[in-house]
Amino acid sequence: MKKALFLIAILAVLFTSCKKDKSKSLNYTDSNPIHVELLGNHQIGVSSEYDITYKAINEDPDVEVITVSGSGNIHGFNVGTAKVKMSNGYNEKTVDVCVDLFREPSYEFGCAPKRIRDIFGKPTNSSANDSILVYQYTNKTPQGFYSAACFQMLFFFKYMEYVEADLYIRNDYVYPLLDNYLDENFEYFFTIPNYYYDDNITNDSVDAIIYKAKFDENIRCGKFEHSNEYDDVCLFYYYHEPETGKNDLDKSLNNLPRSSKFLY
């Protein structure tokens, strides 16, 4: 009997010593900062062998920029910045979170369609006409929009090279959110008078404002209002190649075939 008990004790010790201890590591695989679209969601990329707790840290206690669920899903309530703190009881990490008005298009002008698919996923629709290919991104929300503030995003390819992106922003997000976005990222450059004829809202011609990006003066963003029957604001992004000698008006109007509603 004593031998049996002794053998059981030895086996118990061996079993305990062979059992692998749980790792205390907190394995973070997400970006920093994390970007979330307004009223959108983002699942934090983090794992641990221990349970993880999450805490939203909003810089202004009176403005709830984000919330975070017990499973690590961030919801963007307001445009702005915040932080998320995560802990598994042994290690912790705090990351920044930016809630953006909308997801900006790619600035990799000249890339192939595959690159846009790699970044943004499969387009909702695509169409081709002569030398022009168009990718359309919509239907991410229950209302059929690309995001809460953006009705749809279009990518244009000329001879299979990315040349322009058009975003249609809901007009109720213009003041002050869209104006703030443009002020933070772009500088006014010039105005194109009578750029577009609006036959839905004003029955009159509409000017377009051209901006230069603060991070690269050759990246341009154009804006014109009353762009469709929903009274959206259209933002169009393109790259100005200074070595061509063409001015910005030439570049913006000749990149793509446009309808007769564009006055030039």
Image (spheres, grey):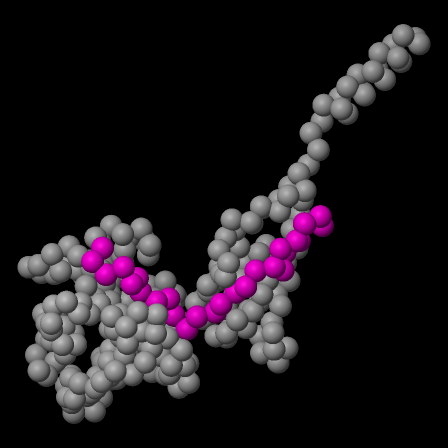
Q: Position of residue 235 (x, y in %)?
A: 27, 75
Does residue 175 appear left or right of residue 123 in this picture? right
**Quarter of image, res 228:** bottom left
117 or 243: nearer the viewer: 243
Examine the rendering and report whether any part of residue 235 can be seen.
no
Where 103 falls versus 200 (above or below)?
A: above
Dividing the picture into quarters, in which one does residue 205 lie? bottom left
Q: Position of residue 5 (x, y in %)?
A: 89, 13
Please tell me which residue is depicted at 22% across the width and 85% down the height of the picture: 190
Whether residue 245 is visible, yes or no, is: yes
Q: Residue furthest right?
A: 2
Which segment did they paint magenta?
85-111
Using residue 41 as the reference point, say whether residue 160 is left or right of it. left
Count of numbered badges drawn on the protein? 0
At x 11%, y 56%, the residue is 159
Q: Position of residue 167 (x, y in %)?
A: 28, 71
At x 13% / y 76%, what residue is drawn?
247
User: Residue at position x 39%, y 86% from top?
Assistant: 175
Tell me, yes or no, whether the highlighted magenta stretch contains residue 59.
no
Q: Is residue 137 left or right of residue 36?
A: left
